[in-house]
Structure formats: structure tokens, C-alpha cells
Image: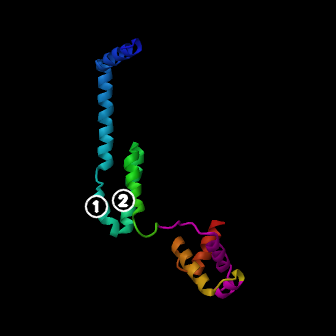
Amino acid sequence: MPESRRHFSRRVDKALNDPDLQRALTNAMTGLRAKREKAFEGFDFEQGRANLKQRRLARETLTQAIAIFDGIGAALWAARTRAELARVSGRAPGSSELTATELRVAELVAAGLTNSETASQLFVTVRAVESTLTKVYAKLGLRSRTELAEQLLRQR
């Protein structure tokens, strides 16, 4: 055995017989085991799969699992969970922020224009304005044009 290998082998043997190093390794492994157990506590992949029919619940459960796995550095489990999340059918919930089109329609309506006037100004159909307003109301949690006008005034 070459000298460098022999020297390395002796250092490894010495390190493995060091009680302080053994204690540190044991503590590290115990800590990792506890983190892993905490990550898996209450999370059941089979239940997550069963929840695929309940898409929103499945997305929430899998998203929480990804956060936990990323938090403890379990990259393989996080990747597996991301793959499961990608298999959830339907589409993920949209942003609560208004798109540029939704904001423009909301501003015109809040300024007092009718749906027909808004449609003419934007060169779209009245139905498109109605549909966009429905989305705006849902995103902002509003129920009327008056509430929309008040909301936009407060944001400025």
C-alpha cells in the first residue's frame, strides 16, 4: 500500500475510534431522523393519491409536502412530490391580482361607463366585458360596481 493510502487509512481508523466524533455523528443522524419523521408525520402519499379526485385538497396537501421536504433538504422526496403535483388534473388556482385587461375594464366601469360603453371603448363584445367583470368581482371579493369603484379608489 502506498504511503499516502496507509497514512489516510490510519487517520480514518483514528477518527472512527474517536468518541467525540462518534457522538457528533450519532447526534447528527438522530437529528436527521427526527426531521425526516416530522416531515412524514401526517403525510400519506396514498391518501394524497386518493385525494386526486378532490383536486384543491390534493394540491394543498402536495404543496405543503413540497415545502416540508425542501425545508429539510430532502430533494428526492420533493421531486417525487412535485411529480405527483404535476399529475393533479385541472388547473391550479389563478392569481388574485388583476390582469392588465381586467384592470382596464375595472377602471372604465368604476369611472361610470356601462358595459356597452366599455366594450365599445375597448373594441370587444359586451359579453367579453361581462365575463371579465365576473372574474374581477371574484378575484377582489366584490359584488357590485359601487364596491368596485370604492376598492379602486382605495388602491390609488
Which tag, 2 or 1, sits closer to the chain's start? 1
Q: How many numbered marks, from 0 up?
A: 2
Q: 22 left or right of 63?
A: left
Residue type at the position of mark 1: Gln
Which residue is the site of mark 2? Answer: 61
* Magenta region, main secondary structure: helix
Q: Quadrant of residue 103?
A: bottom right
Q: Quadrant of residue 20?
A: top left
Front residue (pair 55, 150): 55
Q: Which segment did they paint magenta? A: 93-120
Q: Could you tell me which residue is drawn at 32 percent across and 61 percent down?
A: 48
Query: Residue 4 location in percent, x, y?
Result: 41, 14
Secondary structure, mark 2, is: helix
Secondary structure, mark 1, is: helix
The relative height of residue 10 versus residue 129 in the rendered view (above or below) is above
Residue type at the position of mark 2: Thr
Residue 68: in sight, yes or no? no
Residue 131 lies in the magenta-colored region: no
Q: 105 left or right of 52?
A: right
Residue 138: in sight, yes or no? yes
Distance of label 2 from label 1 (alpha carbons): 10 Å
Which residue is the site of mark 1? Answer: 47
The relative height of residue 2 versus residue 21 in the rendered view (above or below) is above
The relative height of residue 121 versus residue 36 in the rendered view (above or below) is below
Q: Quadrant of the C terminus?
A: bottom right
| Residue with the most extreme right position | 121
Query: Residue 27 location in percent, x, y?
Result: 31, 30
Q: Could you tell me which residue is drawn at 41 percent across and 43 percent down?
A: 73
Q: Are discs 2 and 1 less than 8 Å apart at CB?
A: yes
Q: Quadrant of residue 154?
A: bottom right
For discs 2 and 1, the disc positioned in front in the rendered view: 1
